[in-house]
Structures are given as C-alpha cells and as structure tokens.
Image: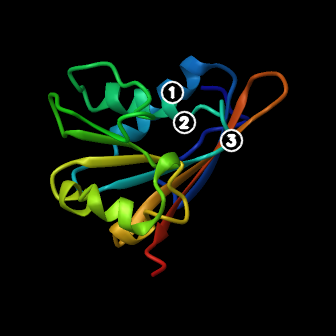
Amino acid sequence: MTTAGPVDLDADDWTIELPTVADTERLGAALAERLEAGDLVVLSGPLGAGKTALARGIGAGLQVDAPVTSPTFVIARVHRGQRVPLVHVDAYRLGGVEDLDALDLDTDLADAVVVVEWGEGLVERLADQHLLVRLERRDDESRIANGRWRERTA
C-alpha cells in the first residue's frame, strides 16, 4: 500500500491511496487483523471501485478456507476458516429492510465478521457501530479508500 505517510488503521478516520488491486487486498488483510466477531464492515463505492477486492483481502486476513468472490447473485456467502467466519453480502439487489431482515444478518453478527457491499444507508442499524469504507476509483485505475468507524444512526 502506498501512502503519502503512515496510515493508522486504528484511528477513527483514515484515508489511503491504493495504486493496485493487490494494494486493495493488502488493505483488507490489514483491516482483518483488527476485526473480530460482531464487527460490521460496510463497503461503499461505484462499480469497479474495489469493494470485492477489499472483501477478498479481509477474507485472506481472516484465513477463510475458500476464495472470496462477489456474492451478487446469491446475496450472501458464509466463509469459514482459521479465525472468525466471514459473512460476505451484496446488498445491491435487496429491495429494502424486509429483504435485509430475511437474511438474519443480526444473528450472524454475533459469531462472524459481516462485510456488506452496497449496504450504505441500509445495514448500519444491525450493529451499535460499523466501519464504513468508501472506495473511489480514479482515472488511472488507482483507488482511494476512506475508512471511518461510525455509531448506529437509527
């Protein structure tokens, strides 16, 4: 990961430049070292911003057994492994709170790290706090990631 200076991922708010997909995956692995069962991570950004690459890195850091791929058509996948299970969700196709409730993610939160792509504005109510990571893709294919721990809003 390349930055203008050191980035403290334990800070309440951080920003990092990610020149390559591999850097995005490394950021995910570094974040995974700080995550534990009960943590909710919300990934936000346009198509191609690196949400799945970041989730793949989180999965690698959590030492899950299977490769992490986009759950677009299955909505949610559970990955088990060495540390903590990862529940990877793609909320893009969810119609609203009723669809979210049907997934029982609040139950999964007790025992797993839950990572939700496209979930901003929908899933925050599942936990007292969550890590919101906003990804932005630049014209040169690099990315910027901004992470912020937030309290439940509703």
- Which is more N-terminal, label 3 or label 1? 3
In the rendered structure, the answer to whether residue 48 lies left or right of residue 149 reads right
Residue at 66% x, 26% y is 2
In the rendered structure, the answer to whether residue 70 lies left or right of residue 17 reads left
The residue identified by callout 3 is 46
Colour logic: rainbow
- Give the residue type that dot 2 points to: Lys
- Give the residue type that dot 1 points to: Ala
List x then y, in percent, for residue 110: 17, 59
Disc 1, SS: helix
Q: Is residue 90 visible?
A: yes
Q: Is residue 29 visible?
A: no
Q: Nearer the viewer, residue 69 or 58?
A: 69
Disc 2, SS: helix
Tally of numbered discs: 3
Label 2 and label 1: CA atoms lie apart by: 5 Å
Q: How packed is label 3: few (under 14 Cα within 10 Å), some, or many (20 or more)?
A: few
Q: Nearer the viewer, mark 1 or mark 3?
A: 3
Location of the C terminus by quadrant is: bottom left
List x then y, in percent, for residue 92: 52, 47
Q: Name the quadrant containing residue 79.
A: top left
Q: How packed is label 1: few (under 14 Cα within 10 Å), some, or many (20 or more)?
A: many
- Give the residue type that dot 3 points to: Pro
Disc 3, SS: loop
Q: Which mark is residue 53?
A: 1
Residue at 55% x, 65% y is 121
List x then y, in percent, for residue 139: 85, 27
Q: Which mark is residue 51?
A: 2
For the residues bearing labels 2 and 1, Cβ distance under 8 angstroms: yes
